[in-house]
Image (cartoon, helix red, strand yellow):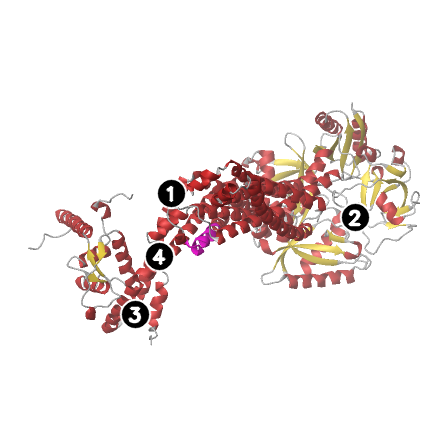
Amino acid sequence: MAKKRTIESYLPLTPALFHVLLALADGEKHGYVISKEIARRTSNEVRLSTGTLYGIIKRLLDDEMIEESAERPDFSLDDQRRRYYRLTKLGKAVAEAEAERMERVLALARLKHVLGPQQA
Amino acid sequence: MATRPHLTERFFNAFLRLFPAEFREHFAGEMRAVFRDQEVDARAAGGTAYLRFYWETGRGLVVAAFREHREILLQDVDYALRLMRKDLSFTAVVVAILGMAIGASTAAFMAAHAVLIEPLPFTGGNHLIHLQQRRPAIGVDDMPFSVKEIQDYRSQNHTLDSVVEFHEMPFSLLGGNEPERVDTGVVSANFFRVLGVSPLYGRTFMDEDDQPNARPVLVLSYRFWQKAFAGDPNVVGREYSMNDKEHVVVGILPPIPQFPAEVDVYMPTVACPTRSGEHALHERSWHMMNVFATLRPGVTMAAAQADLNRIAENLKKTYPEEYPQAKGYEISLQLVHEELSRGIRPVLIVLSAATGLLLLLACANVTGIMMSRVLARTRELTVRTILGASRNRIVRSLITEGILLAMFGGLVGWVLAYSSLGLLVSFTSRYTSLASQLQFTPQIGAFCFLLSVGCGVAIGLLPALGVRYTPLFTMEVGNASLPPGRLNSKGRGVLIATQLALSVILLVGAGLALRTVMQLQRVDAGFRPAGLLTARIYILNGKYREFFGQLLERTRRLPGVESAGLASTIPLHAVNADGPVPVEVRDAEASADGSPKLPIVRIVTPGYFRTLGASIVKGRDFNDQDADATPAVIVNEHMAKHYWPRGDVIGKRISVTSGEWLPIVGVVSDIRHAALDKEPVDEAYGSFWESRQSTMSIVIRSSQPLLELSQQLAWIAHDIDSTAVVADVQPMTQVRSEWIEPRRTTAIFLSVFAMVALCITASGISGMMAVAVGERKHEIGVRLALGATPGTVIRSMMKQVLAVTTIGLAAGFGAAWAISTFMSSVVSGITTRDGSTFAASAVLLLAVAMASGFVPLKQIARLDPVALLKTE
């Protein structure tokens, strides 16, 4: 039987993967919405092409950080080919751990005056 | 009606095909929807965003597909490694079989690549040509050039860049510990410049070195420098005496294949006393030199040939006496690369073909093992399928497993091929100086790698197809003894028949080669090699007659010596100093046939024939009285029968030198001088007393140990003349076996391949029957329970072995029959379609097949039907 992985073993996440987790942090979404939100929130700095996006989704599904949502919107509003994804507990924990890790890095950067003090 | 997808979507669908099937099945529909949405956004954004979107999408799909494949590959490799670790004996057997076959193929490729494919290591090596003068009417194919002819071709041609000359002469090098006979290449000053050879130390020749009265200089070959001077670079600048002149060593060559011959030292043409003599310089008929040239850029061989033909025609017109129509005169061109590899080409073709067959056989065998193994793993594969793995995924993992096993085999093969380098160099050097080009280069590594991958795909594919087309779900989980798919059992039968067929080909090939060697060993060459010592003796001073006379007399007086004699060339020796000579024959009873071959003229002393073991069949041998009597000749039986078939030969006259008619005083039995597998040719022997030979070979028949005798011979020679060189001292048995050696080595190589093939095939048949017993346990149990005896069951299963063996043997013999013609066409002297070889191979293979098939069936006798049926 495969050994259970610790949260730390997933870190650090690639920026694209972290963005996908963040995009799902406030609720389930399908692929197009995930890519759209990431582009919007990063002012188009991070644009995920279809191949990259679904490569990440597959990896997150395999690692059980996300799962397919069984609940579907109203039939008339829904495209049946789309699948909706949501964070699992593990996904949330990994995203939190990555955010904390980045926070620690930022704190260190401030301490070393690489970054200016945090704006109030 | 379904609408036809937009062009961009069709492109997108094409890119989607790059992904693994499982990925596509799961995500393709969704990805298409996202693509369409993103495309609408990109169109709305306008400008370059549109183009950037397509670029990023395409690139993203390629990168993601690659990652997915890599991910699967890593998983499959990890899985295959775990399986291999779990069944180490299976892994070891497969790796060993593939390793041997890949190693042998890589080694054969290494030799073929270095000799047949790799260009010569000289500037423009592939455009270097050898000029050959021919006298077609009298059967002379390679007449050397005279200085005058070289000057004509050099000055009159319009197609050659540089024309250089080479001839080889043995000289004595003095100044070391003892006189040393050195093979000397006498070359034009620009010889090394034309070949583009830079010296390892010092320099090569300059134009000034080849001027009259220039200081004599030498360049040493790498091999001679290592052997005689232990690689001491300080030898450059030292002086050594040669031909009564001091020569200074000016340079040392790097370790390159020497061309056109392996020599010890090189000197410019002016330093060679013969080449710079009056006769050589002024007589057009003083043929001595080999000539080489490079083609001018853009000139074809055909254009150069036409250009040289024009010069040849001019020569014939200008000097009709030198180029008489009766002898004919032509000039031809040969690519040097082809010429150097001509001797070994057939051997390499046969060895490459044999290793190729061995590789096919190994792949067929391992495929059979893999199929049996896949069968044994049916339960595991079924579980994997139930857990969601697709057929494609399983097929892919089996091919990966095959490739991984073959890669390990390739690693073993790599080590084997690398370790065989020394053996290969020594083997190929018997045929060609290109042997020194043999190296384990990156190309060889790449070949080994690609071969391993190819074998891996081959051995993984068939079992994988077996899985693909065998309904796994027909089998209940937990029941591992249901009948296998038809593809599996038929496939294994085909594989065994293939192995048998390939074994037949290898066995017949090896048998024919061995039989040829055995025949060569039994050939009566016209002399008795046992108890015979030979040596080649070179002297510098002009007192040849006195020196060799004394040498012979004192050697004959040595204890244990029965007889001794001298000859210009001894049979089967690498140095063949004698050649065809235009001889006129008086009072011949039958004129020579349509394609007259010139007799070879050799020089011998009294007692030579008796010492060698040849017999005088008519007339008498030369004797000491001939020294002061009228010159005479002895001819061999072949020549006597050729010109005087009624036997009336004694007293007839022939003329070797124009105008001088010599009586025939004796007829000697035929001696195969050139080769054991070549019929005797016309030979005439002149008396030593009439010649001025500075180099002779001695043969001594003695009852005392040959080692002691050789020391005594060297002592006598140096006692008579301290500058005399005694070289190539060896028993005649060794001369003969050295001649046979390359053929024997080829036969041994083929025999080893055949034996390995036989073992692999035997293991394959054994394995097939062991699997068959395992698969049919239930049926066997029922038959035994119903009263069949183990003997009846075994007999019925042996029929299966017999059927497969018969098919394999029939196919194999058909192919071997065709291949024996091929072998005889590429390897001279090989016995073809030898009935006993075919019969012996058939009996051996049949016996091995039946025995190896029977061994696993013995367990049937021990099976308990009740226990078997209970288990079921």
Which quarter of the picture shows residue B715? top right
Q: Amino acid at mark 3?
A: Leu
Q: Are marks 4 and 1 in contact (CB under 8 Å)?
A: no
> Tag 2, which chain?
B
**Left or right of B339, for residue B376:** left
Which quarter of the picture shows residue B524? top right
Q: Amino acid at mark 2?
A: Pro
Residue depth check, mark 1 versus mark 2: number of the one nearer the observer: 1
Find residue B580 and name its label.
2
> Tag 3, which chain?
B
Marks 4 and 1 sit apart, C-alpha to C-alpha, by: 24 Å
Q: Earlier in the sequence, mark 1 or mark 2?
A: 1
Marks 1 and 2 sit apart, C-alpha to C-alpha, by: 71 Å
> Which type of secondary structure does the marked residue at label 4 adopt?
helix
- Are labels 4 and 2 assigned to the same chain? yes
Find residue B51 and name its label.
3
Q: Amino acid at mark 1?
A: Arg
Marks 4 and 3 sit apart, C-alpha to C-alpha, by: 23 Å
Residue depth check, mark 4 versus mark 2: number of the one nearer the observer: 4
> Tag 4, which chain?
B
> Which type of secondary structure does the marked residue at label 2 adopt?
loop
Residue count near mark 3 (Cα–Cα under 10 Å), binned few <14, some 14–19, many ≥20 = few
Q: Position of residue B218 (x, y in %)?
A: 62, 41
Residue B607 versus residue B439 in the image, above or below: above
Residue segment shown in magenta: B457-471
Q: Position of residue B147 (x, y in %)?
A: 72, 52
Q: Amino acid at mark 4?
A: Phe
Residue sitting at 69 percent across and 61 percent down?
B308
